[in-house]
Image: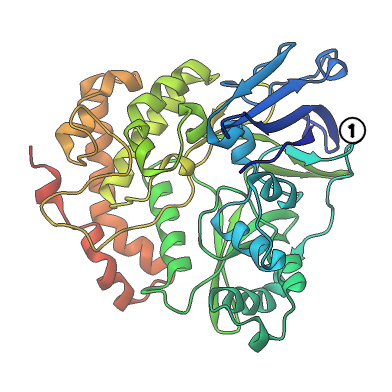
Amino acid sequence: MTSERECYVYIVLPGTTEFVTAGRFHVAPTPDGEAVGEFVYGRRYLERNDAVELDPVELRLRRGPYQTARLEGFFGVIRDAMPDFWGRRIIDINAGPAQLEEFDYLMRGPDDRAGALGFGLNVQPPAPQRKFNRVFDLERLQVAADAVINDRLDIAGFAAAQVEALMRLGTSMGGARPKTVVEHAQDLWLAKFTRQDDRWNFPRVEHGLLKLAAACSLTVADSKITTVGGRDVLLVRRFDRDRTESGFRRHRLVSALTLLQIDEGPGARAGWSYILLADEVRRLSAQPATDLRELFARMCFNAAVSNLDDHPRNHAIIAKQRDWRLSPAYDLTPAPLIAKDRRDLAMTCGKFGRYANRENLLSEHGRFLLSETEAATLLDGIVETVGSQWRFEMRRAGVSEADCETIAGTFLYDGFFYQT
């Protein structure tokens, strides 16, 4: 049962590093127990010449309240800024037996959440966080992550509050893998750790996939590998942050879940669609032709490498100034244990649903502002590059030969790929 709660919503405006108060968010139950959320922009905020919308779908700039009964009363852009599965697990550890509501997770999320938003109980916003873990802390952070995964904080000698202080920092779009944010080389990086039950070296394989995507001319997040205590850690540079002398600029970020106005639950998966996402990108992007070509190429790349975890939370648009653009690609993961006679992406990719073969991927080329010839040339080029370079990029990323053999089935299915 949702209780009545309220907070202020802060935002870091383009080109600045300090929060300003944008409005007020309120959530309360109706008499029948349904949660309804309400957001209203502040009058003073709307009077600012530099005011920007929180998101371009549900909360565009205007006077008066917005209301929603979706997502337990939480607007999509607010949901995007909330802790992900890993972040919630860390918060739960420190909360102990307390029963937390969605609003509690919102308020207990880190200051350095994804995008440009912040939340608090005071009308005056706090100063943004300036202190972060460093790369030399990674070995201790890996130990803390292991303790959380194994539910054995006592072995590691950590108290719950210590674990939360160490591990709760991170974006809200990073999934379930153990991670935190570290400061390194004047930038902020998402550090993604190994798990002791990993079937292959996840940090190096993801790093290799990001480099392979770049070889296919996709725009991807910067990444690097570091090794601490004999274990590899993947560092992915946060593209929603830019460092300045006065602090970090924070850029607005909105997931495809929010653009499509859908949920993550099984019942909402009919709305998970590259085709519908292309329509939204075409409507919102400052450079739709460029971004739609990029989105089509990512869809083809995900099919070519069997990235079947390409759900809407792993796609986003970003606004570094006022205009919105497709964000760099992130969270690329192969799925080798799949049927050899059919492979489906997580999102609809053509007229025949999620079926990841050539005919289906090309079937809605016009929605991406591409001719059939342009789309076919782009798709075939990606398939050729993946087939000829995947092993080279993996080995260059430090993936072992044994791990390459484990994931080889991800890439080697040209015969299937061209089936109709």
Residue 52 place in picture, x, y as percent: 73, 21
- Mark 1 packing: few (<14 Cα in 10 Å), some, or many (20+)? some
Q: Nearer the viewer, residue 8 or 325?
A: 8
Q: Which color scheme does this rendered protein use? A: rainbow
Task: Decide which of 271, 291 is in the foreground and name it.
Answer: 271
Q: Amino acid at mark 1?
A: Val
Relative depth, front residue between 340 and 28: 28
Q: Does residue 257 appear to the left or right of 127 in the view shown?
A: left
Residue 88: quadrant of the picture? bottom right
Q: Residue furthest front?
A: 31
**Residue at horizontal 74 percent and vertical 47 percent from the top:** 107
Side of 6 where 311 appears, left or right: left
Where does the C terminus fall, quadrant-wise? top left
The picture quadrant where one finds residue 81 is top right
| 25 relative to 287 in the view: left or right | right
Camera-nearest residue between 234 and 140: 140
Q: Quadrant of the N terminus?
A: top right
- Residue drawn at the location 73% of the way across and 49% of the way down: 112
Residue 415 point in image, percent of width and height = 9, 50
In this view, 332 is above or below 229: above
Residue 105: where, in percent of width, then height?
A: 67, 50
Residue 219 in view here: no
Q: Is residue 311 left or right of residue 233?
A: left
Tag 1 residue: 123
